[in-house]
Amino acid sequence: MKETKFRAWDKEVKFMISWNQLLKAYDLHTLLKSKDKRFVVIQYSGIKDKNNNEIYEAYIVKITTWWFGRKSTIAEVVFENGAFKAAGELLSNWQDVEVIGNKFEDKNLLKGANIK
């Protein structure tokens, strides 16, 4: 069974924090009722990359394929239609995936969407 985990990006101090750290600092009711939307909550996909790093939505990954020669693509992990996806495919379909950043701290990585 997939492990359910969360992290949060703090837009005010520009820092990624664990769910446990967030709940120690704020009660859940305050977080859910917050109008300023200070925190962006992201969910763990249940998948780890080739280096055993957990992959969360909003993470930027490098996907390497070996069909017809080696090709790498940079993509953001998104949650849509009930599934985690990267580069338009189910995240679980990719075999060679490596976390290289996240969209909050490393937006510049998405500019190189297709690399060799």
Image (cartoon, rainbow, N blue to C red):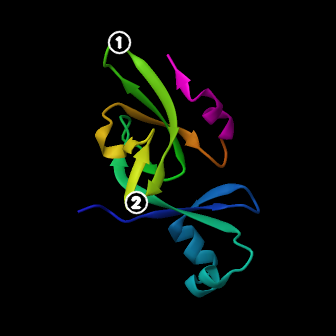
The magenta stretch spans which residues? Answer: 107-116
Q: Could you tell whether 91 is left or right of 56 in the image?
A: left
Q: Label 1, on which residue?
A: 69
Q: Given the current orientation, which residue lies at the most extreme top position?
A: 69
The residue drawn where x is 67% and y is 55% is: 15
Q: Position of residue 31 (x, y in %)?
A: 62, 79
User: Reading the chain from its start, which is encountered first: label 1 or label 2?
Assistant: 1
Q: Position of residue 108 (x, y in %)?
A: 68, 35
Quadrant for residue 94, please give it.
top left
Residue 113 is one of the magenta-drawn residues? yes
Residue type indicated by callout 2:
Asn
Work out whether 71 lies above or below 86: above
CB atoms of marks 1 and 2 within 8 Å: no
Q: Could you tell whether 6 is left or right of 49 in the image?
A: right
Picture quarter with the N terminus:
bottom left
Q: Residues within 10 Å of mark 1 (few under 14, many from 20)?
A: few
The residue drawn where x is 69% and y is 71% is: 37
The local secondary structure at tag 2 comes to loop
Most foreground residue, 19 or 105:
105
Q: Label 2, on which residue?
A: 81
Q: Position of residue 30 (x, y in %)?
A: 64, 85
The local secondary structure at tag 1 comes to loop
Work out whether 82 lies above or below 47: below
Overall secondary structure of the magenta stretch? helix
Q: Could you tell whether 64 is left or right of 74 in the image?
A: left
Residue type indicated by callout 1:
Gly
